[in-house]
Image (tube, rainbow, N blue to C red):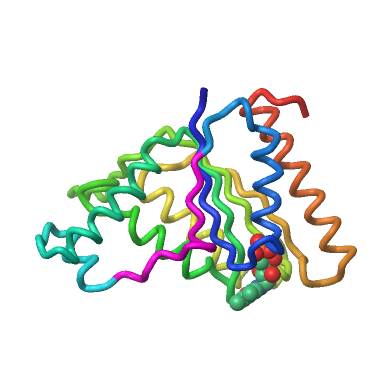
């Protein structure tokens, strides 16, 4: 049975499109996988501090040790996953600061990547990632594309720790009109359903 780690990062609770798209996907995957959830939208992680960075470099104060333990816990969740499903709303052209805080704690030198003379080497290869991106506007084509600081950033951070099998599912135009929102969410749900069928042997 596959292990799925879900990372939710919307601050919108039940009104979140990414949260409900992923929850519907999980309901379908249900019996075919072990699912663990880290919801940094509902339970935000603190931003990095001096104690966090001290913890990463081995400092032994109680604060640094607690920060290191939190990072260790988040990394262990990621290491245990075969598949990671990330809910990534667009806030101000990029990812939410809560999701950034999660990445800041799992991209850790000497643990999830290391540097060599030839460049960085990621330690988490072999995992598959599905990213559900929700956006009020439209960034897939045209003028908006240059403003997308969300998808390239997520891809770069995952690549950096060795994860290259990434599928982005976009629900866009969510703020344009109720009709556009409904249509876009339905299309994203369909795409997720197909992924479920292909990757988790669910009926499409
Ligand atoms: C603080 C904030 C900033 C946002 N910035 C953008 C933005 O830059 N571009 C955009 O298309 N939508 C933006 N939106 C709209 C969200 O992307 C949209 O509401 C999306 O549905 C949120 O994701 P969720 O429904 O999964 O929570 C913003 C929303 C919030 C709350």
Left or right of 113, for residue 174 = right
Return the residue found at the far right: 179
Question: Camera-side residue: 109 or 189?
Answer: 189
Return the residue found at the far left: 60
Q: Is residue 130 above or below residue 183?
A: above
Give the residue drawn at x 56%, y 59%.
Answer: 151
**Looking at the rendering, in which quadrant would you find the C terminus?**
top right
Q: Is residue 136 above or below residue 128?
A: below
Q: Is residue 135 visible?
A: no
Q: Quadrant of residue 142?
A: bottom right
Q: Is residue 37 above or below residue 154?
A: above
Give the residue drawn at x 72%, y 57%.
Answer: 171
Give the residue drawn at x 50%, y 42%.
Answer: 84
The magenta span reads 36-48
Rendering coords of residue 26 (x, y %): 64, 39
Dominant SS in magenta: loop
Q: Quadrant of ligand 1?
A: bottom right
Question: Camera-side residue: 104 or 71?
Answer: 71
Rendering coords of residue 67 (x, y %): 25, 61
Rendering coords of residue 119 (x, y %): 26, 50
């Amino acid at each position: 049975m596959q292990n799925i780690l879900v990372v939710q990062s919307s601050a919108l609770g039940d009104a979140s499109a990414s949260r409900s798209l992923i929850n519907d996907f999980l309901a379908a995957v249900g019996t075919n996988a072990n699912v663990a959830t880290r919801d940094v939208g509902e339970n935000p992680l603190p931003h990095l501090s001096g104690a966090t960075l001290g913890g990463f470099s081995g400092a032994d104060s109680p604060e640094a040790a607690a920060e290191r333990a939190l990072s260790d816990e988040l990394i262990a969740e990621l290491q245990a996953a075969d598949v990671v499903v990330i809910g990534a709303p667009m806030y101000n052209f990029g990812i939410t600061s809560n999701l950034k805080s999660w990445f800041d704690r799992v991209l850790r030198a000497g643990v999830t990547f290391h540097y060599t003379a030839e460049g960085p080497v990621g330690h988490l290869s072999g995992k598959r990632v599905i990213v559900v991106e929700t956006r009020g506007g439209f960034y897939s084509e045209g003028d908006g594309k240059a403003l997308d600081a969300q998808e390239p950033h997520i891809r770069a951070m995952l690549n950096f720790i060795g994860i290259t099998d990434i599928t982005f599912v976009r629900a866009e135009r969510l703020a344009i009109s109720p009709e556009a929102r409904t249509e876009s969410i339905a299309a994203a749900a369909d795409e997720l359903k197909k992924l479920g069928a292909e990757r988790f042997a669910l009926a499409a």
